[in-house]
Image: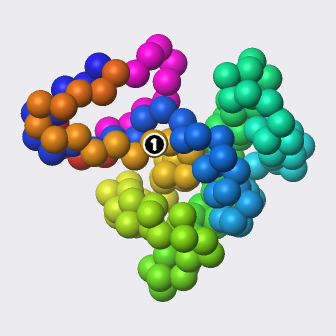
Amino acid sequence: MALAITPFTALCGFLPLDNIVTYLKKVPELAALIPKATLDNFLSISTTIDPNDPAAKQALRDLFSAVMTAPKELFTAQLTNLIDRFESRSVHVEEEEGVRELVLRLNSQFPNDIGTFCSFLLNYVKLSPGEAIFLGAGEPHAYVSGG
């Protein structure tokens, strides 16, 4: 559990599968990090079964793992492409506009960090002082700002 004492932002828990699918289809820099078999499996499963089904959860874990363990030279090149595109204000889909500022912020705070790609996979949460969030064991999360 995290209780905000000051304005607080974090990435926590996965986005709905439909949102992740949109990003995978429209953000080439993200999709390039994922092996084709893993990507195809996730796209197939995420649109055909309940997100709480064990197969969907495993496909999401595999996808997240593929992104987070992408070879450094691959993710560095793709992150550079993404940052260049976002700095020039070029977005492929409306949904990208919602994460553009977050991606640029994370890259300025943590240059060349693979975690920047979590902007497309995890919920971005903003809390006011006194608000709280709870994350179950094993839920991915990263605190962005505040305390």
Residue sitting nearer the eye, 128 or 119: 128
Q: At which x and y percent is residue 14? A: 54, 36
Q: At which x and y percent is residue 119? A: 49, 52
Look at the image and name its color scheme. rainbow
Quadrant of residue 4 within the rendered picture: top left
SS at circle 1: strand
Q: Residue furthest top?
A: 137
Which residue is labeled 1 in the image? 123
Q: Is residue 84 visible?
A: no
Of the 4 image quadrants, the one containing the N terminus is top left
Residue sitting nearer the eye, 37 or 15: 15
Q: Residue furthest bottom?
A: 88
Quadrant of residue 100 within the rendered picture: bottom left
Q: Residue at x 32, y 57 (%)?
A: 109
Q: Amino acid at mark 1?
A: Asn
Residue sitting nearer the eye, 134 or 106: 134
Q: Residue at x 67, y 57 (%)?
A: 22
Of the 4 image quadrants, the one containing the C terminus is top left
Q: At which x and y percent is residue 72? A: 63, 52
Q: Is residue 48 above or below residue 39?
A: above
Quadrant of residue 133 within the rendered picture: top left
